[in-house]
Amino acid sequence: MNQLFVIPLVVFISLGSCQAVIPDRVHFIDASPTLPNYLFRGAIPLTKDHVFQMDSLQQQLRVAAAFENVTLPSGPLYIVDFNLLELELLDRNAEKQFFSSNPQLGKFVHYPIFGDIVGPDTVPSSILKSMAVGISKWQHDNLPKAMQTLVSLLNTNWTRPTAIYIHCEAGMDRTGEVSGSYYMSQLGWSFSQALTYDDKCIEGRNITVYSQNSLQWYCYNLKYTQNAQRDCSIPAQWSPEDCHVRK
């Protein structure tokens, strides 16, 4: 069975020429109820020359928080860089080196994400439940573990106000997969709400089928381990109002 889940290498071409910290891609996700810690998603915070744009990132985090009526503490935030890159070695290593050289500014956490070639809709119903329940045994991305890691980071006492920043390159596909999983598992969103938000409200294009597959697999994992009533079917239509699910 493992041979079904071949890593789709061709889809992860480096986008190193992207501008640093694309404003429209930075979004507030959640905050710790007891600590000054905040969770965000966005695009890669590097220039095309692989220079980390800390000032730009700090600014966009404040803009994104304000949009959701969240007031961040004054002063620079400590950044936990939750990096989803794998094949983009130059970008990944540039971020790792930045925080290695500037540990007072933040921490680099590497959690590579690929997506799944095979989606649950193509799997025989006779094995769907067992595969979904056992997702941590075969899924490269291991989304249950990713969620445990994010919750732990968000509730760690970093001794200063902290932003956990989830990102890939464009801040859409792999970032959408991981953020969408958080929306479902921690914020109570439906699969339809999470996928629609990723597809229609961030950039206006669908996330890759590989990321969609992984997100849907995680929905089935939640369905069979926590909530049997959860609907994990691909939404047939959407409304612009769905982009205001947070409100």
Image (cartoon, helix red, strand yellow):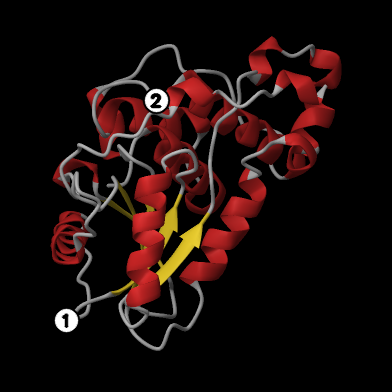
| 105, 206: nearer the viewer | 105
Helix, strand or loop at label 2? It is loop
**Mark 2 vs mark 1: which is more N-terminal?**
1
Is residue 103 rendered to the left or right of residue 147?
A: left
Helix, strand or loop at label 1? It is loop
Q: Quadrant of residue 226?
A: top right
Residue shown at the point (53%, 46%) measured from the top left: 112
User: Label 1 belongs to which residue?
Assistant: 74
Disc 2 and disc 1: Cα gap in Å? 34 Å
The residue type indicated by label 1 comes to Ser
Is residue 17 rendered to the left or right of residue 170?
A: left
The reply to whether residue 37 is in sight is no
Residue shown at the point (29%, 34%) measured from the top left: 15
Residue 191, how many percent across, how many down? Answer: 51, 31
Residue 242 versus residue 113 in the image, above or below: above
The residue type indicated by label 2 comes to Ile
In the image, which disc is placed on residue 207? 2
Residue 229 versus residue 213 in the image, above or below: below
Residue shown at the point (25%, 53%) measured from the top left: 45
| 218, 42: nearer the viewer | 42
Residue 86, how many percent across, how many down? Answer: 49, 42
Residue shown at the point (79%, 11%) measured from the top left: 124
Q: Quadrant of residue 198?
A: top left
In the image, which disc is placed on residue 31? none
Number of other residues with Cα within 10 Å of mark 1, as a class: few under 14, some 14 to 19, many 20 or more: few
